[in-house]
Image (tube, rainbow, N blue to C red):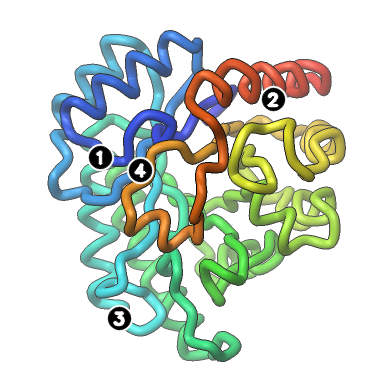
Amino acid sequence: MHGFGVHTSMWTMNWDRAGAEKAIAASVKYGMDFIEIALLNAPAVDAAHTRALLEQHNLPAVCSLGLPEHAWASVRPDAAIEHLEVAIDKTAEMGALALSGVIFGGIGERTGLPPTEKEYDNIAHVLTVAAKHAKKRGIELGIEAVNRYENHLINTGAQAVWMVEKVGADNIFVHLDTYHMNIEEKGAANGILAARDYLKYIHLSESDRGTPGTGNCSWDEIYATLAAIGFKGGLAMESFINMPPEVSYGLSVWRPVAKDEAEVMGNGLPFLRNKARQYGLI
C-alpha cells in the first residue's frame, strides 16, 4: 500500500469479470500504483480472474467494504465474523494486500443514541477474531473513521486509534478519509496527527465527494501534515461516479457530485498528484 491509487467506483461498483477488466485496464491507463476494490458481494467475486488480471499488469490491490445490516458487528458479532472471514479469504485469493473500510459496522448504521460499551466490546471481539484469521492469510485490516451521518461508532482518527489499541493486533491499521475528516476533525492536521502511529492508508476525497480541488478540503494542510509525519502508505483517490442505489442511500449522495470520469481523472487526479509531488509524498 504505497503510492497513488484509485477507488474502482470510478468505473464500477459491481466487481464481476466485466467490471474487473474495465477498472483494471483504466487504472493501468492512468498509471496508478494500486487500486482499491469494493467488495460489496465478496462470495460472488471470481478471485482467480481478478488475480490473473492484477498479476498481468503488476498492479497491487486493496479491498474495502462496509458490513451489511445482517452482519453489523455491534449487534450481530457472529454474523460479522462470518462475513469478514469470507471477505478476508477472497481478498487473499485475489492477491490483494489488505481489507479496509467500515469493517466495524455498516454505512448508514445509526441507533439514534451514543455508542454503548456493549457495542464497542462486540466490535473489538469481532476485529480480534478477524485479525487472527487475516494474519493466517497474510492480510492487514484497516479501520476507516467515517462521519456521524454514516455511522455512530467510529468518526475520528482518535477513535480509530482507540479501537486499534483495544484490539491490540499487529495487523490492524487506521484508514482516514479527507471527506469524513472535513466533517469530524478539528482541522485535518489534528486527525492525521492523532492517527500517525497507526496510519497506513488515506482516501483523498473532496468535501462533496466530487472532483478534488473544487471543494472545501484543506489540501495543503492535509499534504503538509502527511509529509510532516513521514507518511509512506497508500494515497487513494475516492470520487463517486458509478453507484448503485443502495450505496447512494448509505452515503447520502442524492445528486451527481462530478460531471463524469473525464472531469475527475482529467482534473482531480492531476491536482492530487501534483500536490503529492509538491510535498514529497510520491
Q: Which residue is mark 3?
A: 76
Visible residue check, residue 36: no
Q: Quadrant of the C terminus?
A: top right
Disc marking residue 38: 4
Going from the N terminus, do you reach mark 4 or mark 2 first? 4
Going from the N terminus, do you reach mark 1 or mark 4 first? 1
Q: Which residue is mark 2?
A: 272
Q: Of the residues shown, which amino acid type is indicated by label 2?
A: Leu
Q: Of the residues shown, which amino acid type is indicated by label 1?
A: Asn
Tag 4 near tag 2, CB within 8 Å:
no
Give coordinates of residue 97: x percent, y percent: 39, 35
Going from the N terminus, do you reach mark 2 or mark 1 first? 1
Going from the N terminus, do you reach mark 1 or mark 3 first? 1
The residues tagged by marks 2 and 1 sit, at their Cα atoms, a distance apart of 26 Å
Q: Could you tell me which secondary element the residue under label 4 belongs to?
A: strand
Residue under the point 44% across and 74% down: 109
Q: Compare residues 12 and 93 and report the one nearer the observer.
A: 12
Q: Nearer the viewer, mark 1 or mark 3?
A: 1
Going from the N terminus, do you reach mark 3 or mark 2 first? 3
Q: Of the residues shown, which amino acid type is indicated by label 3?
A: Arg
Q: Which residue is mark 1?
A: 14
* Picture layout, residue 108 above or below residue 181: below
